[in-house]
Amino acid sequence: MPDIRDFAAEPTAIADLWVISMKQVSDDRGTVREFYRESAFRAAGLPSLGPWVQVNVTETRRGALRGLHAEDVYKLVAVVAGEAFGAYVDTRRDSATYGKTLTVRLTKGTQVLVPRGVGNGFQSVSDEPTQYVYCFDHEWVPGMAGTAVNPLDPALGIEWPLPVDTTDPSQISVKDVAQPPLDEAR
């Protein structure tokens, strides 16, 4: 008999940022997860995200950190292999939750809906590489509107689970290390 977990969406302390449990059905063969179902999102009061215009998958080794990037796009993010420690920061200066940070343990079946202007970053924490999927409602283009923040900014209070050597580009990009702290970001 199949084991069924229903779709659920939980608001967070950051305005318009949601943690989502994907509907999944498991049986002796494995598991099927609904990555996106328009009607479930709409019924939960979430915005319509379709049609997706760009989908990226990163493969990231244990300990490596990516982000915090807050482009002017909605993102639906999830892991499809491995595990990640997700971190989010509200960079929208006109938001009631500006500067608020939130962390989420990302495992298969958990998603985060990231609104425009909220920084998204993660650290791979599994022994095998983490495959992280990003779905965007607009195509990424060089120079697009948005903000990037140094993910190691102590004022954010993010406690990354694994140490990060800022001189090792296999752990964090030179570009991410060079980003300003939140209070200096545009």
Image: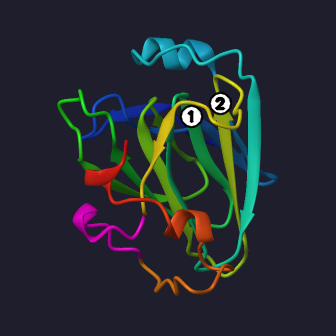
Residue at 44 percent across and 46 percent down: it is 119
| Residue at the left extreme, as displayed | 96
Residue 87, compared with residue 36, is above or below; it is: below
In the picture of the structure, the residue carrying the numbered disc 2 is 136
Q: Residue at x 66, y 23 (%)?
A: 138
Q: Which of the image's four quarters has the N terminus?
A: top right
Q: Position of residue 35 (x, y in %)?
A: 66, 34
Looking at the picture, does residue 110 appear above or below residue 97? below
Q: Is residue 132 left or right of residue 23?
A: right
Residue closest to the far right: 29
Could you say where residue 58 lies in the image, as x and y percent from the top left? 74, 56
The segment highlighted magenta reads 151-160
Which residue is denoted by mark 1 in the rendering?
75
Which x, y percent locates residue 56?
Answer: 75, 43
Q: Which amino acid is tagged 2? A: Phe
Residue at screen point 56% across, 58% down:
107
Q: Is residue 1 visible?
A: no
